[in-house]
Amino acid sequence: MNRMLLPVLAVVSLIGTDAAFAADTPHNVILFVPDGLRALSVTPETAPTMAAIRDQGVNFKNSHSIFPTFTMTNASALATGHSPGDTGVFSNKIYTGYKVAPAADSMAPDLENDAVLGDIDAHMGGNLLDETAVVEAARQAGLSTALVGKLGPTLVFDHMDRSGNGTIVIDDATGTAKGIPLSAEITTAMTAAQLPLTAPSRGVNSDLGDMKTPGTQFANVIQQNYFADVASKVVLPLLKSRNKPFVMVFWSRDPDGTQHNQGDSLGKLEPGINGPTSKLAIKNADDDLARLRATLDQLGLAATTDIVVAADHGFSTVSKQSKTSPAARGHYADTPQGLLPPGFLALDLASALGLPLYDVNDKYARVLAEHHPIAGSALIGDDVANPDLVVATNGNSDLIYLPRHDKQIAARAVAALLKQDYVSGIFVDGRLGKIPGTLPLSAIGLDGKAVTPMPAIVVNFASISTGCAEPVMCSASIADAPQQQGQGYHGGLNRAETMNFIAAIGPDFKAGFVDPAPVSNADVGRTLAQLLGLSITPKGNLIGRVMTEALPGGAVPPSTSGTLVSAPAANGLATTLAFQRVGATRYLDAAGFPGRTVGLPAARVTASR
Ligand SMILES: [Zn+2]
């Protein structure tokens, strides 16, 4: 009996220590996501609140977005700590393998939609991520939880409880039939604060313009003021009144939404996303964060609340120039003559393979001459019910699926891609065999245990620096998107788009610390779970690390850098990947064909280790 009691006594003696106490009662955590904010956009002039957090707290200067550098992929990484090979969120638009009713039966739906997320969850066994999200785990552990901001990524942090009675969810869809309902408690509090129960639209900020008309010159102020009002006047006071630890995510659509749509640079690569409208958007996001910090001060919560600021991805100005693309020589009603139309990748593949294409966003109608798929995505093949390829069009990288896993089609598609000047880097499912010129998807964290269909080929588009002191601040990238040349996009594996803003401040972080180690949004996700004292059992292995060096007493881990180079294709092109590594965790800096990607050394370098 005594032998059985001993271990129990040992455990009891530990409970009285500070370590056990800290683990039992975590500090509050706010994750603030300034969507699409490039790390070097932040200065004391452009974004004083974020600059102060970075300079007084922890500056993660070697930051990394997860590739593909899109919002939903990175929301999933922030929420679970996993790469897309595990979460299955391979981009903003993924091939689902079935017709998604809330997306007008598209098989390549936009995931930035609460109803679409719910539909795919239901079709994928209940949880499309197949991992536990951090806010979901916090709610289950008894913490108070709230999600406020941009439609889609906000909900990802606790997407399976759609009742509105657990986590507070306020996004673009709030107050509509497609949104998550408001609980009686939050409805009463919002009514008392005289705030509408329906979120405002983006209004003039959503104006994309067209080939003759510049897009918006307004930041997303009206909509985000509403979210900041709800967070500061209702949500934070309510969380305080519950008198237990909380986690709140605030996802600021700016600067992303405005950088996409800005009308500062129609048809021109400069100033592109460095014009006055994009600067208004950065300030708008910063103003929202300033309001949250002021509210924490007023409520007496500042000393007990950690603030982590992590942008999902960086950004580039849109280029639509190609000397090789057959699609760029066509005539389209919405595209200036000689430039790439939206959907050029699907058009060029269909042309190279001699196959018809069908629009997944137009009831699978055949795409006729002088037309492009409405949003770019298409099925390619003679039989629309059994296509050879599916292109999920996204932006500065696209996904190609081969529903029949046909190796010959894969080799022919890669051969066609290698002829195009807009391609810089091709990654292929290893099960399709080694194709010269390409690296396997496993090299970039896309080959895991995902429950959604895995892409067969990921195409990274070319980027250039238009000439400035920091090349990542004046990148122009080919974008397969409705945007005009001179507007903004992201999604590529170049340093302008992988170098997102990350900083943190609060009782659990070092002060005035510059972290030289590589970190990623998957690391941020794992660190959030650690801060909240949550023990989440991972299913997949493509997982980030806790950024212990940023926490008191933590040491900077050793890191290495290197390059991975594919076998050359017949025309000499070789996909090259520049990466860093901490232990088994790989950080993707840039990839492509040397000379065609910002941040990739122009000459080939051998791996340092
Ligand atoms: Zn975006």
Image (cartoon, rainbow, N blue to C red):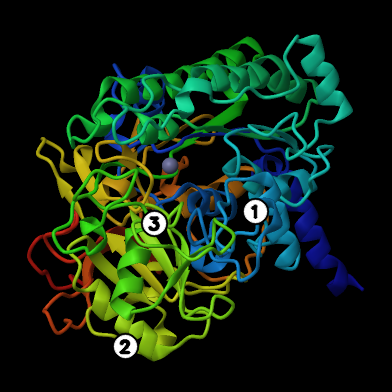
Which amino acid, mark 3? His
Q: Which tag is nearer the camera, tag 1 or tag 2?
A: 1
Specify the quadrant of the image occupied by residue 52: top left
Q: Which of the two discs, 1 and 2, labels the residue nearer the N terminus? A: 1
Tag 1 residue: 104
Q: Which of the two discs, 3 and 1, labels the residue nearer the N terminus? A: 1
Q: Classify 10 Å Cα crowding around label 3: few (below 14), some (14-19), many (20 and above).
A: many
Tag 2 residue: 434
Task: Tell me if the residue at label 2 has its CB under 8 Å from ligand 1.
Answer: no
Q: Is residue 349 left or right of residue 79?
A: left
User: What x and y, as percent, mark residue 153?
Assistant: 57, 44
User: What x and y, as percent, mark residue 504?
Assistant: 45, 34
Q: Secondary structure at mark 1?
A: loop
Q: CA distance from mark 3 to mark 1?
A: 18 Å
Residue 459, above or below 274: below
Which amino acid, mark 2? Lys
Q: Is residue 85 left or right of residue 276?
A: right
Residue 391 visible to an observer of this rendering: yes
Q: CA distance from mark 3 to mark 2?
A: 32 Å
Q: Is residue 426 left or right of residue 290?
A: left
Q: Outermost residue toward the right?
A: 1
Q: Quadrant of the image for the C terminus?
A: bottom left
The answer to which of 314 and 79 lies nearer the viewer is: 314
Q: CA distance from mark 1 to mark 2?
A: 37 Å
Q: Residue at x 40, y 69 (%)?
A: 584
